[in-house]
């Protein structure tokens, strides 16, 4: 683990160019990065995470110009990139015939997910490496995504030679994934950019595609059980059972709180941005062999609440 100084970023860029893995901060969650154009380096990501290789990766770019060497933009996707990049928005686009990204990263699809992150360390790293960097969240497959270098260290220290420490991530949820088809934006994954912001900027309704794969595209990685802590997670709880941990939200009263094993508040003031930033860290801290389960107070459905509730539903899904 190294503080993300300019020196450390240069070293990390050398690692990437030599085909090695580097964990680095983005504004959403930490990523486990490799040179997108080198099949062996990409294979090492799947191996380190224990991730199924049919689950494709996001290519991180430092500019729209770099993205254009990989994919073809339709007019709406271009407008979305111009409005929200750099930032927590991933666009799924047709790969160019001469796209240099390894087919292992796209899992053989003819589309590629691309995103320009806004974290300074991530941008400096891509720029210094001079290649697109594919990076899934830097956790072991199925585990909660990392929002600090310590989380990455706990999951992957033995498998990753270098972890750049850029402090806690600001957004705390993975990027929102969109795919435009015939001018309609489909939401493949709710995330750190709220649907309402996209709709306000474009004036076009965003269609939720999940649940009906025949009607609309889906992200292959959106397995029902994901983001799983060890303990059983219970949603929309208005009371805690003895020995359960509690994730509260705002000031709503929760019964049984005196007997809770641990209590965290995602945002005492009821702010969804703050709750998003705290979610994965508090899930990790609430989790443990000594708790009977994790009760989560009701979270609103609007704004970032959509993505927070999505992650909690997956954490609560039977496995
Ligand atoms: O915020 C983020 O997006 C973080 C940071 C590191 O950038 N990355 C991240 O990557 O969350 P990952 O690998 O954990 O999730 C990527 C998601 C998966 O659900 C995958 O199935 C989907 O993107 N995906 C990738 N390529 C796709 C494609 N061509 N079509 C549809 N879905 C795709
Ligand atoms: Mg992930």
Image (spheres, rainbow, N blue to C red):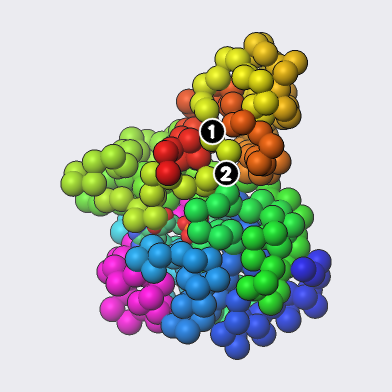
Instruction: Please say if the residues under marks 1 and 2 sit with CB atoms less than 8 Å apart.
Output: yes
In depth, the one of 123 and 240 nearer the eye is 240
Q: Residue at x 44, y 83 (%)?
A: 39
Q: Which mark is residue 233?
A: 1
Neighbours of disc 1 within 10 Å: few (<14), some (14-19), many (20+): many
User: Residue 126: image x %, image y %?
Assistant: 60, 73
Q: Which residue is mark 2?
A: 229
Q: Residue furthest bottom?
A: 18
Q: How many marks?
A: 2
Q: Please say whether residue 91 is one of the residues in the magenta stretch.
A: yes
- Distance between the Cα atoms at labels 1 and 2? 8 Å
Label 2 CB-ligand 2 distance < 8 A: no
Quarter placement of the C terminus: top left
Vertical order, 65 against 145 (above or below) = below
Label 1 CB-ligand 2 distance < 8 A: no
Which stretch appears magenta? 89-112
- Rendered image quadrant of residue 246: top right
In depth, the one of 159 and 63 nearer the eye is 159
What secondary structure is the stretch in magenta mostly built from? loop
Vertical order, 208 against 167 (above or below) = above
Visible residue check, residue 127: no
Q: Residue at x 27, y 51 (%)?
A: 217
- Rendered image quadrant of residue 278: top right
Q: Residue at x 32, y 42 (%)?
A: 210
């Amino acid at each position: 683990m190294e503080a993300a100084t300019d020196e450390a970023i240069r070293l990390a860029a050398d690692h990437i160019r030599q085909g090695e893995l580097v964990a680095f901060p983005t504004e959403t969650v930490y990523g486990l990065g490799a040179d997108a154009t080198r099949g062996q380096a990409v294979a090492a990501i799947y191996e380190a995470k224990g991730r199924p290789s049919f689950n494709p990766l996001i290519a991180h770019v430092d500019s729209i110009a770099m993205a254009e060497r990989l994919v073809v933009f339709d007019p709406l996707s271009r407008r979305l990139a111009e409005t929200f990049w750099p930032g927590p928005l991933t666009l799924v686009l047709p790969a160019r015939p001469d796209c240099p990204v390894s087919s292992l990263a796209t899992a053989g699809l003819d589309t590629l997910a691309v995103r320009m992150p806004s974290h300074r360390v991530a941008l400096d790293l891509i720029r210094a490496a001079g290649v697109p960097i594919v990076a899934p969240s830097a956790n072991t497959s199925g585990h909660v995504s990392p929002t600090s270098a310590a989380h990455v260290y706990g999951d992957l220290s033995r498998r990753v030679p270098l972890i750049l420490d850029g402090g806690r991530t600001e957004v705390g949820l993975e990027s929102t994934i969109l795919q435009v088809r015939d001018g309609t934006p489909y939401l493949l994954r709710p995330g750190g950019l709220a649907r309402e912001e996209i709709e306000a900027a474009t004036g076009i309704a965003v269609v939720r595609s999940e649940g009906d794969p025949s009607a609309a595209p889906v992200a292959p990685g959106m397995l029902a059980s994901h983001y799983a802590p060890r303990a059983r997670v219970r949603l929309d709880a208005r009371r805690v059972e003895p020995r359960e941990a509690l994730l509260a939200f705002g000031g709503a009263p929760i019964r049984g709180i005196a007997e809770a094993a641990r209590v965290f508040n995602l945002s005492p003031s009821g702010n969804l941005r703050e709750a998003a930033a705290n979610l994965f860290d508090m899930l990790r801290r609430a989790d443990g062999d000594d708790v009977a389960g994790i009760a989560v107070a009701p979270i609103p459905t609007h704004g970032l609440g959509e993505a927070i509730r999505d992650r909690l539903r997956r954490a609560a899904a039977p496995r």
